[in-house]
Amino acid sequence: MTAGRRLLRLASLGAALLAWQLLTSLDVNLWLRFEQFPTVGEVASTFADRATTGPYRQDLGFSLRRIVTGFALASVLGVAAGTAIARSRLAADLLGPVLEVLRPIPAIALVPVAILLFPSNEQGIVFITCAAAFFPVLVSTRHAVSALSPVWEEAVLTMGGGRARILFSVILPGALPGIFGGLSVGIGVSWICVISAEMISGEYGVGYRTWQDYTVVDYPGVFVGMATIGALGWLTSTAVERTGRHLTRWLPSRTRGADTPGSRTVGSRAPGPRTPGSRTPGPHVPGSRSPAPAPATADGPPG
């Protein structure tokens, strides 16, 4: 990313904070009411007071542990189930109908089920987080595997490769771009559901602390929780996307060579100006003769 793009992004964030500060400090009350909103300075002061405290760090640890555990389980199960459904008719017939019935159910609606199934709230929250990320990964993997060209698989079979070689050398590498698309969606949905689950049945975590601040009418604390959730979500989402770019670095990059205008591939030559009647010289074949130059005329040099 160029320095100009970084400055543009920082300017966008700064403009949003400036608008927030102006609307809240001036108590704007047109159609939207900003007189009860805390200012940017009040939120920053509350964050500075909490950032070094034990409870704040404890909440961060609980939320991150839940999101990492649930998302890791969803990634493994989603990729495995999606690959099986795309590759096996038996798996599609056995798993497909059940998963398609469960897929439209919001993960947060599974809170009562988690309370009944699991002996502790911690395990229930991890289950809800896993369920939220599972279906985006499943669907993206299924479509990515189904879209692969059978030519690659036939090439491996021709060279004597077995099913395991096809799976790990053709299917999974070829489907990686689509899989990471589902993972990027899944990590965002996981944060939505883990925060909601912490608000409903959690004892610790950023969502639980944010809800407690709301119940005691501590609005700066609520906005500190919201900012923390946004920052954590951005960090984890960026980590997933960078991991995907690293594992799929064999893909052609559309930005390669675009940062330096006028850059060319190494070894290439810029075409020179062509004169009327000139021909581009073709490759020289050994044993062939070069055409003799045309004789000069009285009108000038040969064309």
Image (cartoon, rainbow, N blue to C red):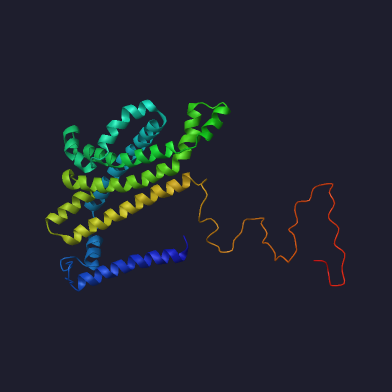
Q: Answer with the quarter of the image where residue 70 lies.
A: top left
**Residue 88, x across and y down, in percent:** 40, 28
Q: How many marks?
A: 0
- Location of residue 95 with respect to 292 vertically, above or below: above
**Residue 208, x across and y down, in percent:** 19, 49
Q: Is residue 220 left or right of residue 5?
A: left
Residue lying furthest bottom: 26
Q: What residue is at 21 percent from the left and 38 percent from the top?
A: 124
- Location of residue 230 with respect to 24 vertically, above or below: above
Specify whether residue 204 is in view.
no
Residue lying furthest left: 216
Q: What residue is at 32 percent from the left and 38 percent from the top?
A: 74
Q: Is residue 112 left or right of residue 279?
A: left
Q: Quadrant of the C terminus?
A: bottom right
Q: Is residue 24 left or right of residue 269?
A: left
Q: Answer with the quarter of the image where residue 214 lies.
A: bottom left
Q: Nearer the viewer, residue 59 or 6?
A: 6
- Location of residue 71 with respect to 98 vertically, above or below: below
Q: What residue is at 29 percent from the left and 31 percent from the top?
A: 97
Q: What residue is at 45 percent from the left and 36 percent from the top?
A: 172
Q: Nearer the viewer, residue 267 or 125?
A: 267
**Residue 186, x across and y down, in percent:** 33, 44
**Residue 277, x across and y down, in percent:** 75, 64
- Location of residue 28 with respect to 190 vertically, above or below: below
Q: Nearer the viewer, residue 7 or 108?
A: 108
Specify whether residue 18 is in view.
yes
